[in-house]
Image (cartoon, helix red, strand yellow):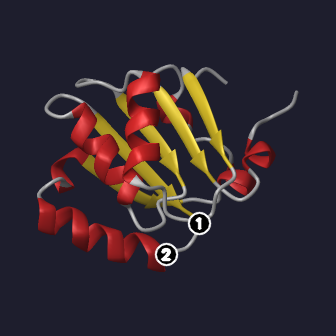
Amino acid sequence: MDFGTLVLSHRTQILYIADISFLIMYLEVVPGCLVLEFGTGSGSLTTLFASAVVPTGYVYTFDFHEQRPASAREDFERIGISTLVTMGVRDIQGEGFPDQFSGLADYVFLDLPQPWLAIPSG
């Protein structure tokens, strides 16, 4: 697996602005970065990732549940970041990481209850 920096989270709640700001600054997520997020949830973290990578970066976000991204997608369109975000449904633990991003992503963020189960151990 070659995805750049991998960040794990075991929180299943909304991250607050102070936490997200620290995360983005600490990781140095800047314009032009490609971010993969697994666990779209409400889309709050996705929104701030998109704000950090604008105008030349991009965020791909995936969630296991089809219902969650539908609500977030509406928010992305409403606030004007839908051109910076692609959403998908994926069981990262069952299907693994999407091969098309190998070697391209600057950051992978796993906002999952048990993120270590998504990391191959071989």
In-image side of 70 versus 14 (left or right): left
Residue found at the far front of this picture: 18
Q: Which residue is mark 2?
A: 66
In the image, what residue occupies the spot 13% across and 32% down?
55
Q: Nearer the viewer, residue 110 or 25?
A: 25
Does 12 appear above or below 55? below
Determine whether the residue tagged by mark 1 lies in a helix, strand or loop: loop
Does 38 appear above or below 21? below
Instruction: From the top left corner, tell me how far across and down residue 44 is, in percent.
Output: 37, 59
Instruction: From the top left corner, tell me how far across and down residue 83 is, in percent.
Output: 16, 49
Question: What is the quadrant of the C terminus in the image?
Answer: top right
In-image side of 115 versus 61 (left or right): right
In the image, what residue occupies the spot 47% across and 60% down?
40
Q: Amino acid at mark 1?
A: Phe
Q: CA distance from mark 2 to mark 1?
A: 7 Å
Instruction: From the top left corner, tell me how far across and down residue 87 is, in percent.
Output: 37, 57
Q: Amino acid at mark 2?
A: Glu
Residue found at the far right of this picture: 122
Mark 2, other Cα within 10 Å: few <14 / some 14–19 / many ≥20: few
Q: Which residue is mark 1?
A: 64
Instruction: From the top left corner, tell me how far across and down residue 111 is, in percent.
Output: 59, 52
Tell whether label 1 touches label 2 (CB within 8 Å). no
Figure quadrant of residue 120: top right
Which disc number belongs to residue 29?
none
In the image, what residue occupies the spot 78% across and 43% down?
116
In the image, what residue occupies the spot 60% across and 34% down?
7
Q: Nearer the viewer, residue 17 or 82?
A: 17
Figure quadrant of residue 2: top right
Question: What is the quadrant of the N terminus in the image?
Answer: top right
